[in-house]
Image (cartoon, grey):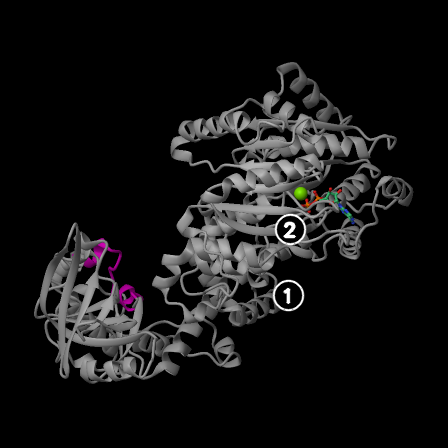
Amino acid sequence: MQGDTSISVQYLKSVGPKRAESFAKIGIKTIRDLLYYFPYKHLDRTTILSSSKIIQHVINGYTGEVTIIGEVIDKELVRYGKKQIFKVTFKDKFGFYECVWFQGIKYFKDLFNTGEFYAISAKPVITRYGNLQFVHPDFDRFGKNETDEFLNTGKIIPFYSLPKELRERNLGDLSLRKIIHYAVENYSGSLEESLPDYIIKEKNLLDIKQTIKNIHFPQNHEALLQAKNRLKFEEMFYFECLTALRKSFIKNTIKGIPFQIRAEPIKKLLNKLPFKLTKDQLNALTDIRKDLESQKPMNRLLQGDVGSGKTIVALISMLIAKYNGYQSVLMVPTEILADQHYKKITALLSGLDTRVVLLIGGQSKSERAKTLEEIKSGKAEIIIGTHALIEENVAYHKLGLVIIDEQHRFGVVQRAQLIEKGFTPNVLVMTATPIPRTLTMTLYGDLDISFINQMPSDRKPVKTYLRSEKKLPEVYNFIKTKAREGCQTFLVYPLIEESEKVDLKAAETYFNELKETYLSEVRVCLIHGRMNWKEKEEIMYKFASKEYDVLVSTTVIEVGIDIPEANIIVINDAFRFGLSQLHQLRGRVGRGKAQAYCILITKNELAVESPQFNFNFEYMSHAQIEKNKSIIRLNAMVKYSSGFDLAEIDLRLRGPGEIFGTKQSGMPELKYTNIIEDADIITEARKTAFDLVASDSKLQHEKNSLIKKNLIANYSSQFKFSRIG
Ligand code: ADP
Ligand code: MG
């Protein structure tokens, strides 16, 4: 007989009311809650080695990571001159070994107690005194008693995080493990299934009872893996159901505006271009044309690496809207970029009888009032600006197309805002953020996608170098020499938000110094975030018209700026930037025919260019990756020019949440699923969900009632733009 899981944990063996209170503080009220308190990791007993085995391995030249369990017999702080080392000595059945810490001593010294057992994982070394040693290892505590039944009987041991609320009640790793073990044995059998039986059967998944058992106390690796996979599938399945419902709602309920395509104005525009569109640009346009001609609103993502030529695709789409009597909005992240688009587009459209307007914060009141009036009356046909264009109360005459440039965060919420305003606009989101396919699917699950994979054929990859600060004089010489040939340079300094003033001062100081010294023979200008809009615009304009050779800047130039003659970018303190930022910055050059250069300047010790650098993360421990992140990033920039390669590395280094700001993007935190590693499961879950919604778009079938119930119970806040039932 299995017990009711909805009762309080206090009724579990060794819990009681006091401990139940502590559990409640960390969100565990019922036995069910406790069953869903999953281990953060497992330790496989079968891979643990003894000290004597490890020594043999080291002698035989093995350099990989190992795991060993032993008891602390001594700990001490050792002084070496000015430096301190924290050393813990352990023993196992066969001998002694030590772990040492050079950093974070204050923290680590309280984590080890004599008489307690620990599992240590790290690369072993043998010191010159012949001791087996581990430097800054990963470790897990077992508690006082190694005769712990799980250590001896269970092959795979779960580790649970033990927050202070529990520790305060004298709950240790061992006692928590025992309580959970008891709960699993006596209660997991009555857990309610959370996926329909037919899906469990079809997909060959574990049922929930078995899943919970195996996630805590698996008999072997296979069992653990199956449990994890079932949880991942379930997580992605419900997520994809929501996406599918939303997509089906938008497609089927909201009526679009079917456009007609007139060829002459497009031809006229194409004839003015100094180049031919690439095949990928043409394909993207075909996709867009089909969307625009249909009864359904367009909802498309255009993904193309930095410099692949997305703007022209946007422009042609806007021209189509205009010739159907509709207004278009082009929304960009910065005012500089808005202004640049405005100028270029105005120039390209001259003679095509199209009214283009710019709406940004820095404009004068009267200018703004006039623009707003034109937007309202319908005189303005192409409207370019920042986010304010949909967030503020701008009144449109007939808005037919919204294009969002360089904005991967524009998501469900913003689109919803538009729909709320009563628009049924066609939406095109353009991004250079090269997202691996599974992530695109997840993040933009309800968008159709077009790719521009191919760069215009006249492009050469940017040559990228890593240089230490010592080499700066040579770099300045290079800039000077190139300036004589007519090349322009961006000289970028990072900006740290906390001390904007100090940074600005730094950029200003460098600027003044360089003008007097290394760069006295060339024309240097400065742009920074604290300038007002007019000042920035003027500098950009002058730089673009070649009145200057070098533009010193904080990162205001990061996104989208297109000055094809500028073909050198020098990024100072490059280690401070993230990979996608570095890639965006580098994308400012190499936009024309000439060979372009990107020089990454960094502290001397980070300037290790290693062409053989191994990006094979499987062979690196977590700690190694952490330690070498900067070097990995910088070397990745030297080695790879494609945004896709860099994005994969970036995802490995940072995890998807951090990159895409999950909160803003409308993507839920994924608890179990890893967007890269679990691509197959995601694809499978997505297909299952989309097929299901295609055949039962309101979840009315009896066999789907459980899905409906769970969606309503757990995700109702996200239903605004989906309809079920
Ligand atoms: P992004 O995709 O980064 O927004 P842009 O649209 O700004 O790129 O285009 C980058 C540069 O390439 C611009 O100077 C643009 O005029 C030019 N360009 C666009 N398409 C082509 C093409 N098919 N052949 C050559 N140059 C092109
Ligand atoms: Mg662009």
Question: Mark 1 and 2 residues: CB-CB less than 8 Å, in contact?
Answer: no
Q: Where residue 15 sits in the image (x, y, percent)?
A: 14, 66
Nearest the camera: 218 or 636?
A: 636
Identify the magenta region: 22-37
- Tell which circle, 1 or 2, labels the residue nearer the N-terminal end: 2
Q: Is mark 2 on a helix, strand or loop?
A: loop
339 on left or right of 579: right
Q: Where residue 398 sits in the image (x, y, percent)?
A: 74, 33
Q: Where residue 159 sits in the image (x, y, percent)?
A: 25, 69
Q: Where residue 608 sits in the image (x, y, percent)?
A: 45, 55
Q: Residue 191 carries which label?
A: none
Q: Name the residue under label 2.
A: 462
Nearest the camera: 390 or 636?
A: 636
Q: Is mark 1 within 8 Å of ligand 1?
A: no
Q: Name the residue under label 1.
A: 694
Ligand 1 position by quadrant: top right
